[in-house]
Amino acid sequence: MKWWFGRKAARDAGRPFLFGGWGAGVSGEPWPRSYEARVREAYLGNPIAQRALAAIGLTDDNARRDMDELRELLRAWRDAKRSAREAVVSWLVRIALALLVAGIALRAGLLEMLRG
């Protein structure tokens, strides 16, 4: 094996090609398979995934609607966090500017002029 920029070169029997779309001619399956078909196949071949989805209630016909509601809830939560963060930053900037103006007024002696 040769060393190339600090990494070993690939062995003779390289790793299997993980992207299934390019191997369609070899495996004989139709190409391109949709993402949903791949996920469905992986789900049907994995009993642990089936139990996990059944445990959280995503195996019925309403699962898509439930997932859409969860996504909408997550989007609303992110929007609320962003709005709260913007409000806090806005108020902190206003307070800092007010303190800066008050400091300039004290330094310039404007309070003395107002009293006298």
Image (cartoon, rainbow, N blue to C red):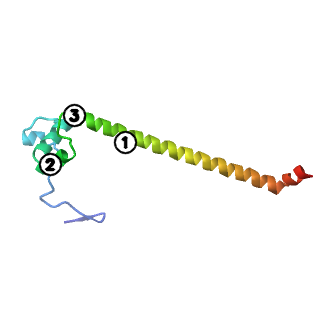
Q: Secondary structure at mark 1?
A: helix
- Residue 14: image quadrant is bottom left
First along the sequence among labels 3 and 1? 3
Q: Secondary structure at mark 2?
A: helix
Query: Quadrant of the image for the N terminus?
Result: bottom left
In the picture as drawn, the residue positioned furthest to the left comes out as: 28
Amino acid under label 2? Arg
First along the sequence among labels 2 and 3? 2
Asked if 82 appears above or below 5 in the picture, the reply is above
In the picture as drawn, the residue positioned furthest to the right comes out as: 116
Residue on which disc 3 sits: 62
Q: CA distance from mark 2 to mark 3?
A: 17 Å
First along the sequence among labels 2 and 1? 2
Q: Is residue 21 visible?
A: no
Amino acid under label 1? Leu
* Mark 2 touches mark 1? (CB < 8 Å): no
On the image, the x and y values in percent for residue 86 come to 54, 44
Report crowding for label 3: few under 14, some 14 to 19, many 20 or more residues within 10 A (C-alpha): few
Residue on which disc 1 sits: 74
Instruction: Indicate which disc residue 51 carries.
Output: 2
Q: Residue at x 11, y 43 (%)?
A: 44
**Horizontal relation, residue 110 to residue 35: left or right:** right
Report crowding for label 2: few under 14, some 14 to 19, many 20 or more residues within 10 A (C-alpha): few
Q: Is residue 58 visible?
A: yes
